[in-house]
Amino acid sequence: MPLLTVKQRRQLAALATRQRLPPRTVVFHEGDALSWVFIDGDGVLKSFRELPSGKRRIVAFLFPDDLFGLAENGRYVNTVRTVTGATVFRIPYQTLAAALQRDPELEFQFLSKVTHELRATQRQTLVLGRRDAAGRLAMFLIMLERNMPQPRRAGRIPVLMSRTDIAEYLGLSLEAVSRATRDLARKGIVEFEGSHSVRVLDRNRFESLAEAL
Amino acid sequence: MPLLTVKQRRQLAALATRQRLPPRTVVFHEGDALSWVFIDGDGVLKSFRELPSGKRRIVAFLFPDDLFGLAENGRYVNTVRTVTGATVFRIPYQTLAAALQRDPELEFQFLSKVTHELRATQRQTLVLGRRDAAGRLAMFLIMLERNMPQPRRAGRIPVLMSRTDIAEYLGLSLEAVSRATRDLARKGIVEFEGSHSVRVLDRNRFESLAEAL
DNA sequence: CGTAGTATTGAAACGGATCAATATCTGTGG
DNA sequence: CCACAGATATTGATCCGTTTCAATACTACG
């Protein structure tokens, strides 16, 4: 997933409004009328659904350049909320639809982005198919590593979200996530520096655990 | 998801090759070089991945009008194989890419299709997030019902795939699927007529079970 | 009609959920 | 700057459902 090209940025800038959002800000709610489509310029957000039982399932974490604002029948499908502070680009849906009809190249960028989201979601179904908490966590950490901004310092992965968020994403209880982190550390595969930074100690075992199932 | 319009069919017909495939035919393998993009015209297919452990995870079932042939770095991401006999439309990737650059309206149809696949995959993550086999199965059956061809005869849902396929899709063991079907039947929620057709007996309990988690 | 794949059922063990108690972190106001 | 409160995280003990292993039944196709 390359960053946006200069040209794309220019095209988008003409259509979009840039917006700075503090942490824990709701961008839109599930069921709201579709009015804008968004691109994450910077920061992490989560896209989730509230279930009838009161539980919450995070469908995706959104990283820079990710497209979001998926709708069905004119209504957003998920709620989106910032995790960290974030900058988003907001494009009125009607404006976007019109621009896409006019500009096939721009449209192709959007097609690529949606395809990218599709691949990411398919990968998540693989994660959720696993039965073991430690394996799911390892896959999650690798996903974070892939989405890490530039300076990837030797095996140090920043974990911007809470344990609860991770649990809701991995389909595990908070406790299971906590225990899985402890287990990975105990086995000497990773090391936690505070609860929001991980360092990979044994890359081989880390990756083979992730690819195990 | 509406069927293709007459116009779309005409556009596609100009680009695509129609192909009739017997049951259990591999369309392409994970890792093969991307050469065509496909649309299911008729019949059911499965898109899956072989895991290092030898296990298999079905990422999606494909129903009429579904687009498939997702690739990354020029290689297919999943293996696709027919479940029933099927008719597929096969479009050379290069031809398609060129056509999309020329025809924004056609491109928009593809954008819609990919978006549709994305929604479907997100729904599946919700299914996989559940812990109870019976609930997952109920959601699966409702998904089948939604994708059923025209003549939806009073609560009778044809189940074209094997128990094993269902298990690989739901992230359960074969045995768990078997027991879940038995449980749904025992509770009088559905009734099986042979193992490849279900009749919904108690629509209310059926749907509330599916929406439970 | 037989055989190979497919499905069902039972018994036991494992792993995660849940409940509950305690610990740690974060941000706010005194 | 420190103390406090609320949220977040860790750890322990028990329970429950699914996996696994194993044996048997079904069914579809040649």
Image (tube, coloured by chain):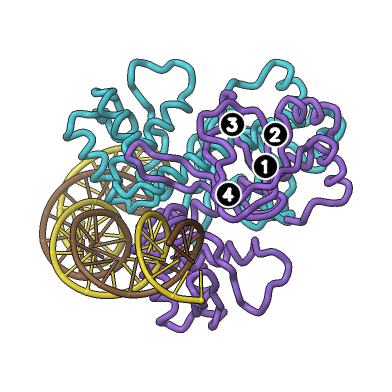
Chain colours: A purple, B cyan, C brown, D yellow
Q: Nearer the viewer, mark 3 or mark 4?
A: 4
Q: How many marks?
A: 4
Q: Which mark is residue A71?
A: 3
Q: CA distance from mark 4 to mark 1?
A: 20 Å
Point 61% across, 77% down: residue: A155
Point 44% across, 79% down: residue: A185
Which residue is the site of mark 2? B111
Point 72% across, 55% down: residue: A1
Q: Do marks 2 and 3 both belong to one polypeptide chain?
A: no
Disc on the earlier residue, 4 or 1: 4
Q: CA distance from mark 3 to mark 1?
A: 12 Å
Name which residue type carries label 2.
Leu
Query: In this image, A166 relative to A38: left or right?
Result: left
Disc 4 residue crowd, few under 14, some 14–19, many 20+, Cα 10 Å:
many
User: Do labels 1 and 2 touch, CB within 8 Å?
Assistant: yes
Which residue is the site of mark 4? A82
Q: Circle 3 sits in a helix, a strand or a loop, which is it?
A: strand
Residue A76: image quadrant is top right
Query: In this image, A202 relative to A42: left or right?
Result: left
Query: B161 and B23: which one is in front?
Result: B161
Q: Nearer the viewer, mark 4 or mark 1?
A: 4
Q: Circle 4 sits in a helix, a strand or a loop, which is it?
A: strand
Q: CA distance from mark 1 to mark 2?
A: 8 Å
Name which residue type carries label 4.
Thr
Q: Nearer the viewer, mark 2 or mark 3?
A: 3
